[in-house]
Amino acid sequence: MFMKAKTLAMNLVRPHMGRRLVVLTASLIIIGLCVAVFKTVGFGTDPGSTFSLGISARTGVSFGTCQLVFNLLLFFPVILLDLSRIGIGTVGNMVGLGYIADFFMRRLEALIPPEGFSMTERILLFAVSMVGFLVAASFYMVVDMGVAPYDAVPQLIAAHTTKWSFRSVRTLWDISLLSTGFLLGAAVGLTTLITGFCLGPAIAFVSSRVKGWFD
C-alpha cells in the first residue's frame, strides 16, 4: 500500500509542473472543441468518442456523462493493476473532456445556419479541427501527466499477455468500441481513419521537438 501511494505521489509531482498543467489544460480544451466539431460536421470521431456518442444517442444521456461513466468503469482496474499510469491528466481527461465537448457542441448548434453547413464549410472545419486534435492530443501525451483510462486498459492487457502485441490489442480494442458505437447510432467516417493512422506519428513528431520543455 505504501509503495502504491508513493507511486501515485510521484505521478502528481513532476518537473515544471506549472508548464505541464497549462499545456495539459489547453490540450483538453482543444481536444474537447475538436470532438464537438467532428460531431457537428458528421465525418465521424475517434473510436472512444464514437462509443460514448453511440451510448448518448441511444439513451439520451449527455455525451459528457456517458464519457465520465465509461471511464470510471475503466478506472477501477487501472487503479488495481498499475498506478503508474494515473496522474492529473487521467482525472482531467476522465472528468472534464466530455463536458468540455458538450459545452462546445451546444455553442456550435447555435451557429449552424437553417440550411446547415455547406460541404465546403464542413470540409474546412474538419481539416482545421483534425490538425488541432492531432497536435493537442500529442501535447496531452508528451506532458506525461497520466493517460486516460480508455488508453490505459489496452496497455494493461498487452502488458499481461505474451500472445498479443500492444498494437494488436489496441487495434482490437478500438475496433470493438468503434463498432459498438456505430451500431448504437454514432457516425463513423474519415475522422476515425485519420485519427487511427496519424495520431501515433503526430505524437512522435511533437515529442521530438518539445519534450525538452518539460524535462
Image (tube, grey):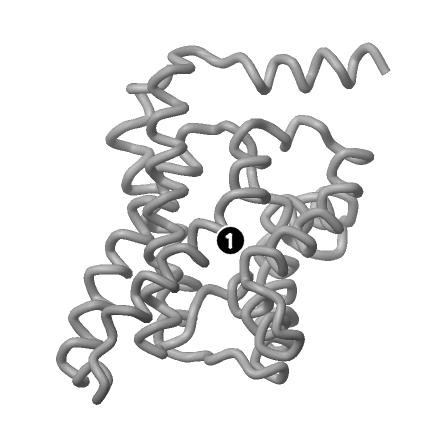
Residue 69, position in %: x, y? 69, 54
Q: Is residue 110 left or right of residue 99?
A: left
Where is 102 relative to 59, above or below? above
**Label 1 Cα crowd, 10 Å radius (few <14 / some 14-19 / many 20+):** many
Using residue 74 as the reference point, say whether residue 66 is left or right of it.
Answer: left
Name the quadrant of the N terminus.
top right
Q: Toward which corner of the image does residue 124 lie, by quadrant?
A: bottom left
Instruction: Please state the horizontal and vertical placement of residue 181, each as a whole percent of the image.
Output: 59, 75
Image position, residue 166 (x, y; %): 62, 51
Image quadrant occupied by the C terminus: top left
Q: Secondary structure at mark 1?
A: helix
Depth order, front residue of 105/165: 105
On screen, residue 187 versus residue 105, left or right, reads right
| Residue that mark 1 sits on | 98
In this view, the residue in front, 103 or 4, is: 103
Find the residue positioned furthest to the bottom.
115
Name, please, the residue furthest toward the right.
Answer: 1
Q: Position of residue 141 (x, y in %)?
A: 44, 37
Label tally: 1
Q: Is residue 3 above or below residue 66?
A: above
Which residue is pictured at 36% across the width and 79% down the height? 42
Instruction: Tell me which corner region of the image, top left, top right, bottom left or bottom right, holds residue 152.
Output: top right
Q: Residue at x 33, y 44 (%)?
A: 136
Looking at the picture, does residue 38 appear above or below residue 183?
above
Looking at numbered disc 1 in the image, what kind of residue is underneath it? Gly
The foreground one among 26 and 74 is 26
User: Which residue is found at the position 21% from the left and 68% from the top?
Assistant: 125
Please identify the quarter of the rendering in which residue 101 is found.
bottom left
Picture residue at 79% right of the left edge, 13% below the top: 3
